[in-house]
Amino acid sequence: MDAKKQFSRIGWAYVIFLVLAEVAVVFFGVAGLWFIDTSNTGIYLLLSQLAMYGCGFPVFYILMRRIPSWTKVQPEKMSMGKFFLCLIVSFGFSYIGSIMGQLLADLVKQVTGTEMLNPVLDIISDINPWMLAVSTVLIAPVMEELMFRKMLIDRIIPFGQKTAVLVSGISFGLFHGNFSQFFYACMLGMIFAYIYSSTGKIRYSIILHMCINFVGGMVSLLSMDKPMMLKLLTIWMLGCIIATVVLACVYKNEFSFFSGWAGIEYGIVKKILTAPGVIGFLILCLLMFAVNFHV
């Protein structure tokens, strides 16, 4: 299996998805002006997701299906105890990543006077809770886990689990298109990738993703004008961060990665970064990051 060719084909599939998704969002957004009130943030978000996944995903799926893939022969179950630990660690790293993104945004603003936009805050502050639940707790976790875990990892795991985890996490972070979300999305992507590649069951990462989005979206929205809930949410955040640091120190030597069987991992980074499709994906993502800067 030619690593460079494999990653290039995958990269082009994501490029085509992003382009089709953006075109669909713009087209349906303009067309929607004739039928619905797209100034409503919730309706516009739901319409955008339906347009993005309804138009972009079918083509992406067809392209990815043509690329050789692997399936774990004997999926492994995860105990409730391990799942709960993974849930705490996922929350912890999502908060750590959010803090990193905020620190970077503050630094950039002080140095350049340029403000980095945070789409999450803009959406949460002006959206119906039920619309938010459908969009971010149901649709997004399922589609994103299929695209960045199931379909991606099945095609790159032959080059090693470590490679699959890193590529899945970084590409997931880049997909969000802004620095405010990049760090926590990247960290969560790696955690979910490790869980899926180790168990072979996508449902674990989907459920974890739903929990993260539920607390980060729904609970945060409902807590905005409730001081007590904000205090509890803050305590939860600090508790998860502390627990994550402790768990990471305790279990750091228990993580293991299995090697690939389609070629050695040595030199794989160069092959990935020089693959034309990957270069196209990186350029497109960098353009998305540039758009999300606001002077």
Image (spheres, helix red, strand yellow):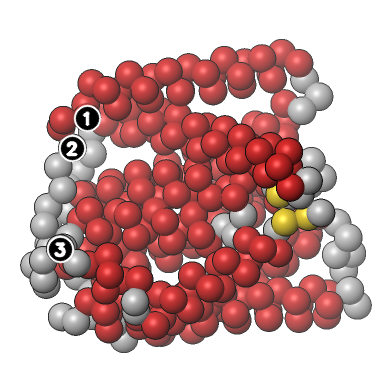
Secondary structure of the residue carrying tag 2 is loop
Q: Earlier in the sequence, mark 2 or mark 3?
A: 2
Amino acid at circle 1: Lys
Residue 41 horizontal side relative to residue 117, left or right: right
Residue 80 horizontal side relative to residue 255, left or right: right
- The image quarter in which residue 46 lies: bottom right
Please state the horizontal and vertical placement of residue 35, each as a whole percent of the image. 88, 74
The image quadrant where one finds the C terminus is bottom right
Q: Earlier in the sequence, mark 1 or mark 3?
A: 1
From the image, state whether disc 1 or disc 3 is nearer to you: 3
Can residue 50 be seen by looking at this rendering? yes
CA–CA distance between discs 2 and 1?
Answer: 6 Å
Q: Residue at x 77, y 28 (%)?
A: 224
Please state the horizontal and vertical placement of residue 147, each as a whole percent of the image. 43, 66
Quick check: marks 2 and 1 in contact, CB under 8 Å? yes
From the image, state whether disc 2 or disc 3 is nearer to you: 3
Q: Is residue 111 above or below residue 168?
A: above
Secondary structure of the residue carrying tag 3 is loop
Residue 1 horizontal side relative to residue 165, left or right: left
Q: Residue at x 61, y 21 (%)?
A: 233
Question: For mark 1, what is the residue?
Answer: 252
Identify the disc placed on residue 255.
2
Please state the horizontal and vertical placement of residue 115, each as a whole percent of the image. 75, 47
CA–CA distance between discs 2 and 3?
Answer: 20 Å
Can residue 201 be seen by looking at this rendering? no
Q: Residues within 10 Å of mark 2 (few under 14, many from 20)?
A: few
Amino acid at circle 3: Tyr
